[in-house]
Amino acid sequence: QVQLVESGGGLVQAGGSLRLSCAASGRTFSSNTMGWFRQTPGKEREFVARISGSGGRTNYADSVKGRFTISRDNAKNTVYLQMNNLKPEDTAVYYCAVLATAGSFYSPGSYDYWGQGTQVTVSS
């Protein structure tokens, strides 16, 4: 069975950095878009970033553009999210996901596999 496991979350001060990792198992996803989403209590899951199967194309939410970088290592079946200059509003549970079927990579409903999430908390 497919499993996605996020790691790297934690508590950081505003202006600091974290790198999240998402390790996939059960299948390889070198041909699939992978994405990062985030969610706070009582709110819908929102798009953060996505990367194409080859790594050749990336897209970011306006709120993180210039601060976050998504990357992947297909040899390790892993996707990363480098987060720099973190702000308190970045506080959320961060999830990685795989788009295994056709759909909009901005929409959480288009993604087929999800990790359990990792908490990122940014203090002032």
Image (cartoon, rainbow, N blue to C red):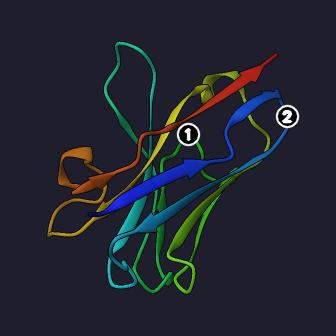
Left or right: where 14 falls relative to 79: right
Q: Secondary structure at mark 2?
A: loop
Query: Spatial distance from mark 2 to mark 1, Cα to Cα?
Result: 15 Å
> In this rendering, which labeled residue sits more in front, label 2 or label 1?
2
Q: Residue at x 51, y 45 (%)?
A: 62
Image vertical order of residue 68 relative to residue 122, above or below: below
Of labels 2 and 1, earlier in sequence is 2
Residue appearing at x 41%, y 68% in the figure: 25
74 sits left or right of 67 in the view: left
> What amino acid type is highlighted by mark number 2?
Gly
Q: Position of residue 51 (x, y in %)?
A: 46, 70
Residue under label 2, please give it.
15
- 40 vs 29, left or right, is right
Query: In x, y percent, where is residue 18?
Result: 76, 45
Q: Which residue is pictured at 37% across the width and 80% down the height?
A: 28
Check if mark 2's residue and mark 1's residue have beta carbons within 8 Å: no
Tell me the quadrant of the picture where the C terminus can be found. Answer: top right
Q: Does residue 16 sit above or below 76 in this rendering?
A: above
**Picture quadrant where residue 73 is located:** bottom right
- Quarter of the figure with residue 42: top left
Amino acid type, mark 1: Ser
* Disc 1 target residue: 63
Q: Callout 1: few (<14), some (14-19), or many (20+) C-alpha neighbours within 10 Å?
A: few
